[in-house]
Image (tube, rainbow, N blue to C red):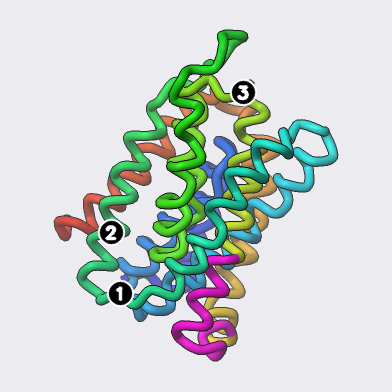
Amino acid sequence: MMGIPALAAAFFATALLYASVGFGGGSTYSALLALSGFDYRLLPVLALLCNIAVVAGSTVRFARARATPWKGALLLTGLAAPAALVGGLTPIGEGAFFTLLGGSLVLAGVALFVPQSVGEAEPHRLAKALPFAAVPLGFLSGLVGIGGGIFLAPLLHLSRWNNTRAIAATASVFILVNSVFGLAGQLIKNGPDRLSEAAAIGLPLMIAVVIGGQIGSFLALRMFTPQLIRWLTAALTSWVGLRLLFGL
Protein backbone atom coordinates (compact mmCIF):
# COMPACT_ATOMS: atom_id res chain seq x y z
CA MET A 1 0.00 0.00 0.00
CA MET A 2 1.40 3.38 -1.03
CA GLY A 3 1.16 6.50 1.09
CA ILE A 4 0.04 9.85 -0.30
CA PRO A 5 3.59 11.06 -1.20
CA ALA A 6 4.31 7.88 -3.17
CA LEU A 7 0.87 8.03 -4.80
CA ALA A 8 1.45 11.67 -5.77
CA ALA A 9 4.71 10.67 -7.45
CA ALA A 10 2.96 7.84 -9.31
CA PHE A 11 0.12 10.16 -10.35
CA PHE A 12 2.67 12.73 -11.57
CA ALA A 13 4.42 10.13 -13.75
CA THR A 14 1.09 8.80 -15.04
CA ALA A 15 -0.17 12.28 -15.99
CA LEU A 16 3.12 13.11 -17.71
CA LEU A 17 3.01 9.96 -19.83
CA TYR A 18 -0.70 10.07 -20.64
CA ALA A 19 -0.73 13.80 -21.44
CA SER A 20 2.17 13.19 -23.82
CA VAL A 21 -0.03 10.92 -25.93
CA GLY A 22 -3.20 12.99 -25.54
CA PHE A 23 -5.04 11.15 -22.75
CA GLY A 24 -6.07 11.84 -19.15
CA GLY A 25 -4.97 8.69 -17.29
CA GLY A 26 -8.18 8.11 -15.32
CA SER A 27 -8.09 4.32 -15.52
CA THR A 28 -4.56 4.16 -14.14
CA TYR A 29 -5.37 6.63 -11.36
CA SER A 30 -8.24 4.38 -10.27
CA ALA A 31 -6.02 1.31 -10.38
CA LEU A 32 -3.25 2.94 -8.35
CA LEU A 33 -5.79 3.98 -5.72
CA ALA A 34 -7.24 0.46 -5.70
CA LEU A 35 -3.82 -1.09 -5.18
CA SER A 36 -3.34 1.32 -2.27
CA GLY A 37 -6.48 0.08 -0.51
CA PHE A 38 -8.86 3.01 -0.93
CA ASP A 39 -12.64 2.49 -0.85
CA TYR A 40 -13.57 1.43 -4.40
CA ARG A 41 -16.59 3.77 -4.38
CA LEU A 42 -14.24 6.72 -4.00
CA LEU A 43 -11.94 5.71 -6.85
CA PRO A 44 -14.04 6.94 -9.81
CA VAL A 45 -14.59 10.32 -8.17
CA LEU A 46 -10.88 10.91 -7.56
CA ALA A 47 -9.88 9.52 -10.95
CA LEU A 48 -12.40 11.66 -12.83
CA LEU A 49 -11.35 14.79 -10.95
CA CYS A 50 -7.75 14.10 -11.94
CA ASN A 51 -8.83 13.40 -15.51
CA ILE A 52 -10.55 16.77 -15.70
CA ALA A 53 -7.47 18.49 -14.27
CA VAL A 54 -5.21 16.94 -16.92
CA VAL A 55 -7.32 17.31 -20.09
CA ALA A 56 -8.94 20.70 -19.44
CA GLY A 57 -5.73 22.51 -20.35
CA SER A 58 -5.06 20.45 -23.47
CA THR A 59 -8.66 20.93 -24.64
CA VAL A 60 -8.27 24.71 -24.39
CA ARG A 61 -4.89 24.64 -26.15
CA PHE A 62 -6.25 22.58 -29.05
CA ALA A 63 -9.24 24.90 -29.35
CA ARG A 64 -7.04 28.01 -29.40
CA ALA A 65 -4.89 26.42 -32.08
CA ARG A 66 -8.07 25.68 -34.09
CA ALA A 67 -7.09 22.01 -34.22
CA THR A 68 -10.42 20.67 -32.94
CA PRO A 69 -12.85 19.40 -35.59
CA TRP A 70 -15.86 20.58 -33.60
CA LYS A 71 -18.60 19.04 -35.72
CA GLY A 72 -17.26 15.49 -35.41
CA ALA A 73 -15.98 15.92 -31.87
CA LEU A 74 -19.30 17.22 -30.59
CA LEU A 75 -21.23 14.46 -32.35
CA LEU A 76 -19.18 11.70 -30.70
CA THR A 77 -19.08 13.44 -27.35
CA GLY A 78 -22.78 14.30 -27.41
CA LEU A 79 -23.64 10.64 -27.89
CA ALA A 80 -21.22 9.45 -25.21
CA ALA A 81 -21.89 11.99 -22.44
CA PRO A 82 -25.46 10.87 -21.51
CA ALA A 83 -24.21 7.28 -21.44
CA ALA A 84 -21.37 8.37 -19.13
CA LEU A 85 -23.97 9.86 -16.78
CA VAL A 86 -25.93 6.59 -16.83
CA GLY A 87 -22.71 4.66 -16.21
CA GLY A 88 -21.93 6.82 -13.21
CA LEU A 89 -25.43 6.22 -11.85
CA THR A 90 -25.25 2.43 -12.31
CA PRO A 91 -24.62 0.43 -9.10
CA ILE A 92 -21.68 -1.96 -9.34
CA GLY A 93 -20.18 -4.38 -6.83
CA GLU A 94 -16.56 -4.26 -5.76
CA GLY A 95 -15.57 -7.46 -7.59
CA ALA A 96 -17.19 -6.43 -10.87
CA PHE A 97 -15.69 -2.95 -10.57
CA PHE A 98 -12.13 -4.24 -10.23
CA THR A 99 -12.61 -6.82 -13.01
CA LEU A 100 -13.91 -4.18 -15.42
CA LEU A 101 -11.21 -1.71 -14.40
CA GLY A 102 -8.39 -4.24 -14.75
CA GLY A 103 -9.74 -5.48 -18.08
CA SER A 104 -10.09 -1.90 -19.32
CA LEU A 105 -6.47 -1.19 -18.44
CA VAL A 106 -5.16 -4.24 -20.27
CA LEU A 107 -7.23 -3.39 -23.36
CA ALA A 108 -6.04 0.21 -23.14
CA GLY A 109 -2.43 -0.97 -23.04
CA VAL A 110 -3.01 -3.02 -26.19
CA ALA A 111 -4.81 -0.08 -27.84
CA LEU A 112 -1.76 2.13 -27.34
CA PHE A 113 0.16 -0.02 -29.82
CA VAL A 114 -2.24 0.90 -32.64
CA PRO A 115 -0.27 2.94 -35.23
CA GLN A 116 -1.01 6.66 -35.18
CA SER A 117 -0.32 7.48 -38.80
CA VAL A 118 -3.39 8.61 -40.70
CA GLY A 119 -2.02 10.41 -43.76
CA GLU A 120 -4.19 11.72 -46.53
CA ALA A 121 -6.06 8.47 -47.23
CA GLU A 122 -9.83 8.47 -47.56
CA PRO A 123 -11.75 7.58 -44.38
CA HIS A 124 -12.31 3.86 -43.91
CA ARG A 125 -15.89 2.55 -43.88
CA LEU A 126 -15.34 1.89 -40.16
CA ALA A 127 -15.66 5.67 -39.67
CA LYS A 128 -19.42 5.43 -40.24
CA ALA A 129 -19.75 3.08 -37.24
CA LEU A 130 -17.91 5.37 -34.81
CA PRO A 131 -21.09 7.05 -33.44
CA PHE A 132 -22.32 3.61 -32.37
CA ALA A 133 -19.06 2.97 -30.49
CA ALA A 134 -19.34 6.27 -28.62
CA VAL A 135 -22.29 5.14 -26.49
CA PRO A 136 -20.70 2.04 -24.90
CA LEU A 137 -17.45 3.94 -24.43
CA GLY A 138 -19.36 6.67 -22.60
CA PHE A 139 -21.10 4.14 -20.38
CA LEU A 140 -17.82 2.43 -19.47
CA SER A 141 -16.29 5.84 -18.77
CA GLY A 142 -18.89 6.73 -16.17
CA LEU A 143 -19.04 3.25 -14.67
CA VAL A 144 -15.36 2.82 -13.76
CA GLY A 145 -14.11 6.42 -13.78
CA ILE A 146 -12.25 6.81 -17.07
CA GLY A 147 -12.57 9.28 -19.93
CA GLY A 148 -12.80 6.75 -22.75
CA GLY A 149 -10.44 8.61 -25.04
CA ILE A 150 -7.81 5.91 -24.76
CA PHE A 151 -10.22 3.58 -26.59
CA LEU A 152 -11.72 6.18 -28.92
CA ALA A 153 -8.43 7.47 -30.32
CA PRO A 154 -7.24 4.11 -31.74
CA LEU A 155 -10.64 3.65 -33.41
CA LEU A 156 -10.32 7.10 -34.97
CA HIS A 157 -6.83 6.25 -36.23
CA LEU A 158 -7.89 2.87 -37.62
CA SER A 159 -10.81 4.44 -39.47
CA ARG A 160 -8.62 7.27 -40.83
CA TRP A 161 -11.20 9.62 -39.35
CA ASN A 162 -8.96 12.71 -39.45
CA ASN A 163 -5.35 13.79 -39.04
CA THR A 164 -3.35 12.94 -35.92
CA ARG A 165 -3.66 16.37 -34.32
CA ALA A 166 -7.42 16.53 -34.87
CA ILE A 167 -7.79 13.07 -33.33
CA ALA A 168 -5.83 14.11 -30.24
CA ALA A 169 -8.00 17.23 -29.93
CA THR A 170 -11.18 15.16 -30.28
CA ALA A 171 -9.98 12.68 -27.65
CA SER A 172 -9.35 15.57 -25.24
CA VAL A 173 -12.88 16.93 -25.67
CA PHE A 174 -14.31 13.41 -25.35
CA ILE A 175 -12.40 12.72 -22.13
CA LEU A 176 -13.22 16.08 -20.56
CA VAL A 177 -16.97 15.96 -21.17
CA ASN A 178 -17.32 12.26 -20.31
CA SER A 179 -15.40 12.84 -17.09
CA VAL A 180 -17.72 15.67 -16.06
CA PHE A 181 -20.86 13.64 -16.81
CA GLY A 182 -19.47 10.48 -15.24
CA LEU A 183 -18.50 12.42 -12.12
CA ALA A 184 -22.02 13.85 -11.89
CA GLY A 185 -23.46 10.35 -12.05
CA GLN A 186 -21.08 9.05 -9.38
CA LEU A 187 -21.97 11.91 -7.03
CA ILE A 188 -25.71 11.44 -7.54
CA LYS A 189 -25.31 7.71 -6.86
CA ASN A 190 -23.03 7.86 -3.83
CA GLY A 191 -23.91 11.30 -2.45
CA PRO A 192 -22.23 14.71 -2.82
CA ASP A 193 -20.18 14.09 0.32
CA ARG A 194 -17.94 11.91 -1.84
CA LEU A 195 -16.70 15.06 -3.56
CA SER A 196 -15.47 16.70 -0.35
CA GLU A 197 -14.01 13.38 0.81
CA ALA A 198 -12.18 12.95 -2.48
CA ALA A 199 -10.94 16.54 -2.43
CA ALA A 200 -9.63 16.17 1.12
CA ILE A 201 -7.67 13.04 0.23
CA GLY A 202 -6.83 13.89 -3.32
CA LEU A 203 -5.68 17.52 -3.33
CA PRO A 204 -1.97 16.56 -3.43
CA LEU A 205 -2.77 14.04 -6.17
CA MET A 206 -4.63 16.62 -8.27
CA ILE A 207 -1.75 19.07 -7.89
CA ALA A 208 0.63 16.31 -9.02
CA VAL A 209 -1.40 15.51 -12.15
CA VAL A 210 -1.75 19.17 -13.11
CA ILE A 211 2.03 19.60 -12.96
CA GLY A 212 2.70 16.26 -14.65
CA GLY A 213 0.14 16.95 -17.34
CA GLN A 214 1.64 20.34 -18.17
CA ILE A 215 5.14 18.90 -18.37
CA GLY A 216 3.85 16.02 -20.48
CA SER A 217 2.16 18.41 -22.89
CA PHE A 218 5.10 20.76 -23.35
CA LEU A 219 8.33 18.86 -22.71
CA ALA A 220 8.03 15.09 -22.92
CA LEU A 221 7.75 14.88 -26.69
CA ARG A 222 10.94 16.90 -26.98
CA MET A 223 12.85 14.52 -24.72
CA PHE A 224 11.62 11.18 -26.08
CA THR A 225 10.14 9.95 -29.33
CA PRO A 226 6.31 9.72 -29.39
CA GLN A 227 6.55 5.97 -30.03
CA LEU A 228 8.73 5.42 -26.94
CA ILE A 229 6.28 7.38 -24.80
CA ARG A 230 3.38 5.28 -26.12
CA TRP A 231 5.28 2.07 -25.30
CA LEU A 232 6.09 3.27 -21.79
CA THR A 233 2.46 4.26 -21.25
CA ALA A 234 1.26 0.91 -22.63
CA ALA A 235 3.65 -0.97 -20.32
CA LEU A 236 2.51 1.00 -17.26
CA THR A 237 -1.16 0.58 -18.13
CA SER A 238 -0.91 -3.15 -18.83
CA TRP A 239 1.16 -3.88 -15.71
CA VAL A 240 -1.31 -2.13 -13.39
CA GLY A 241 -4.27 -3.80 -15.11
CA LEU A 242 -2.73 -7.27 -14.77
CA ARG A 243 -2.00 -6.61 -11.11
CA LEU A 244 -5.64 -5.79 -10.53
CA LEU A 245 -6.89 -8.79 -12.44
CA PHE A 246 -4.51 -11.44 -11.13
CA GLY A 247 -3.04 -9.97 -7.93
CA LEU A 248 0.50 -9.90 -9.30
Q: Report, in whole angstroms, how far the alpha carbon at label 2 lies from the one at label 1.
A: 10 Å
Q: What's the residue type where badge 3 is placed? A: Asn
Who is closer to the viewer here, 195 or 135? Answer: 135
User: Does the residue at mark 2 contact the one at mark 1 (Cβ under 8 Å)?
Assistant: yes
Q: Please indicate whether residue 228 sits to the left or right of residue 12 in the image.
A: left
Residue topped by disc 1: 92
Does the magenta portion include 177? no
Residue depth check, mark 2 versus mark 3: number of the one nearer the observer: 3
Could you tell me which quadrant the C terminus lies in?
Answer: bottom left
Q: Is residue 203 above or below residue 171?
A: below
Does the magenta portion include 184? yes
Q: What residue span does the magenta drawing correspond to?
A: 181-195
Q: Is residue 122 above or below residue 159?
A: above
Query: Element at badge 3?
Result: loop
Q: Please indicate whether residue 65 sits to the left or right of residue 83 in the image.
A: right
Q: Residue at x 51, y 45 (%)?
A: 149
Q: Main secondary structure of the magenta part?
A: helix
